[in-house]
Amino acid sequence: MAEIKTERLDSYLRLIDISRDLASTLDLNQLLDRIVNAAADITSAEAASILLYDNTSRQLYFQVATNLDEPTMRGLVVPLDGSIAGWIVTNRKSVRIDKVHTDPRHFGDVEQTTGIPTQSILGIPLITKNKVVGVLEALNKREGHFTAGDENLLTVLGAQAAVAIENARLFQQSDLISEFVHELRTPLASLSTATYLLLRPEMSREQQEQIVKNIHTETLRLNSLASSFLDLARLESGRVQFQKSTFDIMDLLHECRDVVASKAEEENIQIRVIEPDGPTMLDADRNKIKQIILNLLSNALKYNRPNGSIILKAVSSEGEMQISVQDTGIGIPEDAIGHLFEKFYRVRDHETKAIGTGLGLSICKQIVQGHGGSIEVKSRLGIGTNIIVSLPRVSKTIPR
Ligand code: ADP
């Protein structure tokens, strides 16, 4: 008995430590990591995870888990109806289940996909400002059953976690939004100058035409800034689920070349697609990989020289597929390479060469990382740039 009490006291002390910890970080990923590790720890569970609820799709998606990596989580969604996590959200109540498989609410897909068997679950709703934001689950009690004491501990942790998640999210959003608003200033300023000039009586017909062209370009830029920004915000928040399927990369490379063919013709730029020696099948989210390739192709065209060329290639080995887009363009200065994946970053000298948002490569990186891959830039000033995307050929999750 005395032993049990000491154990409980230890857990409470640990909880106080964690609360202090949670209050001191606004980095959402780091925060969620700490919460799940603490949850598994204080309830003596094998694993713990947080699922966040998306009101629009009425689904829960894995945000963090002690035993799953990012690419696996990105492929997992849990429906509101017909799952234990969904029941917790709908009923705003915690559950303690010893034998998950005999429970009619159990949603077997996740287990099937991850291959990690679940025996027992302790789950609590994460509620802030009277809104359920998600579920905190501890899985597989190491010895015996989850107790009422475990439930109390997890509930206290959950209450702290919900507030911390909300704060970190608001902080993350305001950070991103302030960057976005800052980026809006330049095109808005040129639009306002342009319209002012357009109204001046001394402007010649040619000058007016030039101003209207500028207005058109800036409007296009604002448009792509807005859609890229939304894309990136969704990817960064972890809300984008990847729809994996098995497809032939060569078909996709040809498809992408066709999309940009007329633009390439206008600039007199040749695009060559090189057939790989190895296998060509890839298991990934086809639309998202297409978005990456189109983005890289668009850069290779924009920052190329007239009469230049582009080589589009896939090289595959047993476990990996490397897709590269190589151009004969203006290249990237060495000191800029380290900044390319920062949001809104553009090489200063390139700003006048082509319109851009500085978000394309950040979007590519998010998608690549979500697939468990990596992206590398090789470039030589005045000679050209080669961007290489490496992806695992077989995704860790079973296609849905
Ligand atoms: P943007 O919309 O500005 O093209 P990206 O995020 O796609 O945004 O790229 C960031 C910056 O990296 C670009 O503004 C450009 O300066 C540089 N860059 C990207 N791709 C290339 C390339 N193929 N050749 C030269 N510079 C490039």
Image (spheres, rainbow, N blue to C red):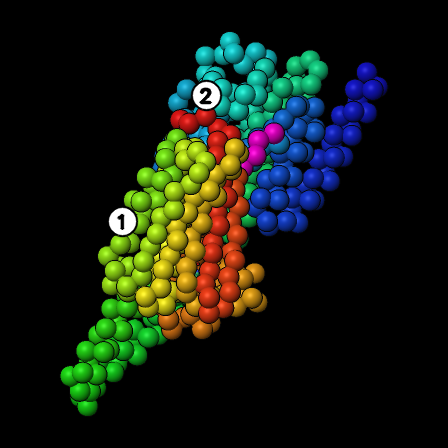
Residue 105: x and y in percent read 46, 16
| Residue 37 visible | yes
Q: Residue at 56%, 61% (x, y): give it.
A: 338
Q: Amino acid at mark 2?
A: Asp
SS class, disc 2:
helix
- Magenta portion: prevailing SS class: loop
Q: Which mark is residue 109?
A: 2
Instruction: Give the total number of marks visible in the rendering.
Output: 2
Q: Nearer the viewer, mark 1 or mark 2?
A: 1
Q: Is 12 on the left-hand or right-hand side of 189?
A: right
* Placement of the N terminus among the 4 image quadrants: top right
Q: Which residues are magenta?
A: 67-71
Image-quadrant location for residue 94: top right
SS class, disc 1:
helix
- Give the alpha-carbon distance from disc 1 to disc 2, as whole Å: 38 Å
Q: Quadrant of ligand 1?
A: bottom left
Query: Does 69 appear in magenta?
Result: yes
Which residue is at the far bottom? Answer: 202
Image-quadrant location for residue 104: top left
Q: Residue at 73%, 40% (x, y): give it.
A: 17
Query: Badge 1 is on which residue?
Result: 258
Q: Amino acid at mark 1?
A: Asp
| Residue 357 visible | no
Residue 146: x and y in percent read 65, 18
For the residue carrying disc 1, how many other residues have a C-alpha within 10 Å: few (<14), some (14-19), or many (20+)?
A: few
Which residue is at the far right? Answer: 2
- 291 or 240: nearer the eye? 291
- 69 or 119: nearer the eye? 69
Residue 240: x and y in percent read 42, 40
- Disc on the earlier residue, 1 or 2: 2
